[in-house]
Image (tube, grey):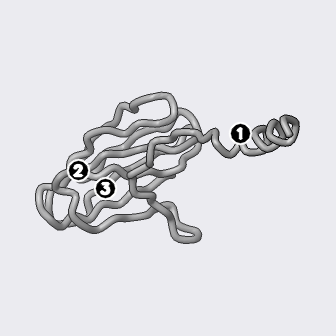
Amino acid sequence: MKKLLLMATLAVAPLMVTSVQAADTSTKITFAKDSYCGSFTGNIKNGKVFRLWLMPDQNLVIRNVGDDQINVAYVSGPTGRLSGDRYDNETSYITQRKGNHHMKVYGNSSHSAVEFCAY
């Protein structure tokens, strides 16, 4: 009986071990086939985090394509935050490593249009 109980416990033990992983609440940006760009249209007044899988040495361009103003709070890659260059309606970053990159973007109205391109 002890042997049967031990075997049952050993069989169930792996099911009891679960990995705790924070839920990714970012919005995934996808590109249409044969395109270098993806976009988001909606409310980002309170800020929204987007994610995009990128390779090293890509030029990530975040562009305002709407009528309001946007602000890129940060872009972070697998090894930390990236420094960007701001132009009129866009901010550009060079990626360092492959992996998910997260971008937090704010708009100044309840309807914004943002384009994410990787070259």
Asked if residue 93 lies left or right of residue 88, the reply is right
Looking at the rendered image, the quarter that the N terminus falls into is top right
Q: CA distance from mark 1 to mark 2?
A: 42 Å
Residue that carries the numbered disc 2 in the rendered image: 47
Q: Residues within 10 Å of mark 1 (few under 14, many from 20)?
A: few
Which is more foreground, mark 2 or mark 3? 2
Asked if residue 46 lies left or right of residue 4, the reply is left
Q: Position of residue 115 (x, y in %)?
A: 35, 60
At 36% from the left and 45% from the top, the residue drawn is: 103
Residue that carries the numbered disc 1 in the rendered image: 13
Q: Position of residue 56 (x, y in %)?
A: 57, 38
Q: Label 1 sits on what residue type? A: Ala
At 30% from the left and 46% from the top, the residue drawn is: 104
Q: Position of residue 119 (x, y in %)?
A: 51, 51
Residue that carries the numbered disc 3 in the rendered image: 63
Q: Is residue 64 above or below residue 49?
A: below
- Between 107 and 23, the residue placed more toward the observer is 23
